[in-house]
Image (spheres, rainbow, N blue to C red):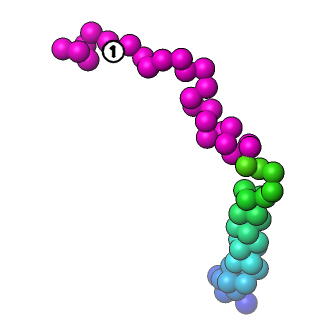
Amino acid sequence: MDSYSFLRELADSWVLLLLVLFFLGTVLFAFRPGSHPLHRDAAESIFRNEKKPAAASQEEVE
């Protein structure tokens, strides 16, 4: 068996199975119970410590 046929057979079976399991594991990890506060904190982190809008510079006004 040449290496191309072996790698093709490996990719069609085991690697495909591993990638599907990795995808399902990633989805289950993201949507696991109790992760909502972590995701909410990450989503709102860009607004942290922001008191007011930035002042317009003189170049933007003209």
Number of callouts in the render? 1
Farthest-out residue, bottom: 1
**Of the pair 23 and 45, the residue shown nearer to us:** 45
Label 1 sits on a secondary structure element that is loop
Q: Is residue 61 magenta?
A: yes
Rendered image quadrant of residue 24: bottom right
Residue holding disc 1: 56
Q: In the image, residue 33 lies at what x, y percent?
A: 81, 56
Residue 13 vertical placement versus 26 (above, below): below
User: Which residue: 76% across, 63% down?
Assistant: 28
Screen quadrant of the N terminus: bottom right
Q: Is residue 4 magenta?
A: no
Rendered image quadrant of residue 10: bottom right
**Of the pair 45 and 19, the residue shown nearer to us:** 45
Residue 21 vertical placement versus 41 (above, below): below
User: Which residue: 71% across, 74% down?
Assistant: 20
Residue 7 vertical placement versus 46 (above, below): below
Q: In the image, residue 45 lies at what x, y percent?
A: 62, 32
Q: Is residue 57 left or right of residue 9?
A: left
Q: In the image, residue 32 lies at what x, y percent?
A: 79, 58
Residue 26 is at least partly visible in this image: no
Farthest-out residue, top: 58
User: Which residue: 57% across, 31% down?
Assistant: 46
Screen quadrant of the C terminus: top left
Residue 61 is at least partly visible in this image: yes
The span picked out in magenta is 37-62
